[in-house]
Amino acid sequence: MLKKVAIFGVGLIGGSFALALKRARAVQQVVGVGRTAATLERAREIGIVDAISTSVQEALQDTDLVLIAAPVAQTETILATIKPHLQAGTVITDAGSTKTDVVAAARKALGDKIGQFIPGHPIAGRESNGPDAAIADLYIGKKVVLAPLPENASADVERVAQAWQQCGALIHRLSPEEHDRVFAAVSHLPHLLAYALVDDVANKPHADLLFQYAASGFRDFTRIAGSSPEMWRDISLANQAALLQELDAYIAQLTKLRANLVAADGNALQQMFAHAQQARQSWIRTIEAAEKQNRNGGD
């Protein structure tokens, strides 16, 4: 059991982590640290944290684990405030959606204490934000990617892994560079596309009419455009190089699609749609098989 966990950012991600640890009886005390007093008070009011602190020194006293669940652009500043009070037995991890920039920020902020920082990324979320969006079962059956550094002690990496496993998560490992290339394609680009589509429709002179008739297809495709603009601004800029590569590839795909449409090439359109359908069906089968295995305890 963890004696004390400090969470910087007690919204959806950090709050759900706290609730999951509490439900698993894997932590004795959770302390919330954040920018907004009202948010911290709300997190304490609804039982996410046991205590709140405006003093980083106080929050880190005798703390086993620190989770930074704030927008990635804040990582360096938060780690810089942590360093003077970081005790030898404390391990820090994060929940940022990019990793190479976070690692660079951590090296700059922590210096010779970099070994106490284990980069992480829980692959889970909802379109709502804040403490009231937090749920104890957010991470059940979901992947958490750890990107350990050469300086990390294996016991410290295992402490972070076990904490996420207590939340019901499945641990995967990637290098920071691999992580950012993968998520530029399957997470960051889809968010950009969802935001761009909703913004395009909203800017049309007959937007009210369009939204009146938008149904489940539009809703499902654009659901993630309800996520935090601040967070996705930071992610987009942090993973700029990999995201630009994926965006260029997608633009090329759209150009090809447009050419087929202009040429009224139904066969080419159907081939593209059929290939996408088959790929998606195969992906869904893989997910369902993994979920079934998890429900059966890995048998």
Image (cartoon, grey):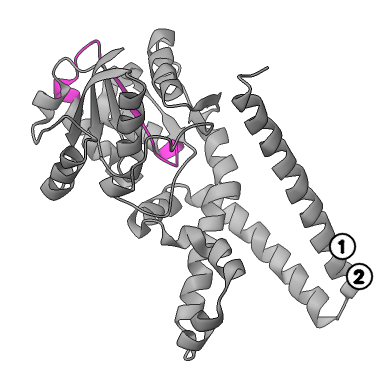
Q: Which of 7 and 189 is in front in this view?
A: 7
Q: Nearer the viewer, residue 246 or 170?
A: 170
* Residue at point 63%, 60% (across, down): 248
Image quadrant where one finds the C terminus: top right
Q: Nearer the viewer, residue 98 or 22?
A: 22
Q: Name the disc covering residue 180, or none.
A: none
Crowding around mark 2 (Cα neighbors within 10 Å: few <14, some 14 to 19, many 20+) is few
In the rendered image, the vertical position of residue 184 relative to residue 287, given as above or below: below
* Residue at point 34%, 17% (across, down): 115
Start-end of magenta stretch = 83-101
- Residue 125 position within the rendered picture, expressed as x and y whole percent measured from the top left: 44, 45
Which quadrant of the figure has residue 54?
top left
Instruction: Using the numbered discs, state the Cα–Cα distance from disc 1 to disc 2 in whole angstroms.
Output: 6 Å
Q: Is residue 153 left or right of residue 83?
A: right
| Residue bearing the label numbered 2 | 267
Image quadrant where one finds the N terminus: top left
In the rendered image, the vertical position of residue 282 relative to residue 94, given as above or below: below
Q: Do the residues labelled 1 and 2 touch (CB within 8 Å)?
A: yes
Say which element carries label 2.
helix
- Residue 81 position within the rendered picture, expressed as x and y whole percent measured from the top left: 17, 32
Which quadrant of the figure has residue 114?
top left
Q: Is residue 120 left or right of residue 7?
A: right
On whether residue 28 falls in the magenta region, the answer is no
| Residue bearing the label numbered 1 | 271
* Residue at point 57%, 73% (across, down): 215
In the rendered image, the vertical position of residue 85 relative to residue 198, given as above or below: above
Badge 1 amino acid: Gln
Badge 2 amino acid: Asn
- Residue 192 position within the rendered picture, expressed as x and y whole percent measured from the top left: 51, 60
In the rendered image, the vertical position of residue 133 relative to residue 102, given as above or below: below
